[in-house]
Image (cartoon, grey):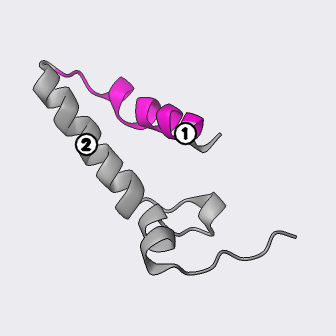
């Protein structure tokens, strides 16, 4: 489920909004987006934290109700 959401977000927020002229531009744009997705973009399912915050800082997620 999470991987499917990643690809959906990548396509909607990056790929469909850009007109890449070369494969190199596409690779750079996608790499930049993945960095943003993991390091800067808050995720509702992670209590508005980034995946890097959760993974590297090992803060426990709140228990589900």
Query: Does the magenta segment cover residue 55?
Result: no
Residue that label 1 marks: 3
- The magenta segment is 4-20
The quarter of the image holding the C terminus is: bottom right
Residue found at x 62% / y 60%:
44
Is there any visible trace of residue 26 in the rendered image? yes
- Total of numbered circles in the picture? 2
The main secondary structure of the magenta stretch is: helix
Disc 2 secondary structure class: helix
Residue that label 2 marks: 31
Q: Position of residue 10 (x, y in %)?
A: 42, 36
The quarter of the image holding the N terminus is: top right
In the rendered view, tell whether residue 57 sits above or below residue 46.
below
Residue found at x 23% / y 21%:
19
Residue found at x 66% / y 74%:
61
Which image quarter: residue 14? top left
């Amino acid at each position: 489920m999470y991987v499917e959401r990643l690809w959906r977000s990548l396509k909607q927020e990056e790929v469909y909004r850009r007109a890449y002229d070369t494969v190199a531009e596409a690779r750079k744009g996608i790499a930049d987006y993945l960095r943003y997705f993991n390091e800067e973009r808050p995720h509702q399912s992670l209590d508005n934290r980034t995946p890097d915050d959760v993974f590297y800082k090992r803060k426990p997620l709140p228990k589900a109700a």
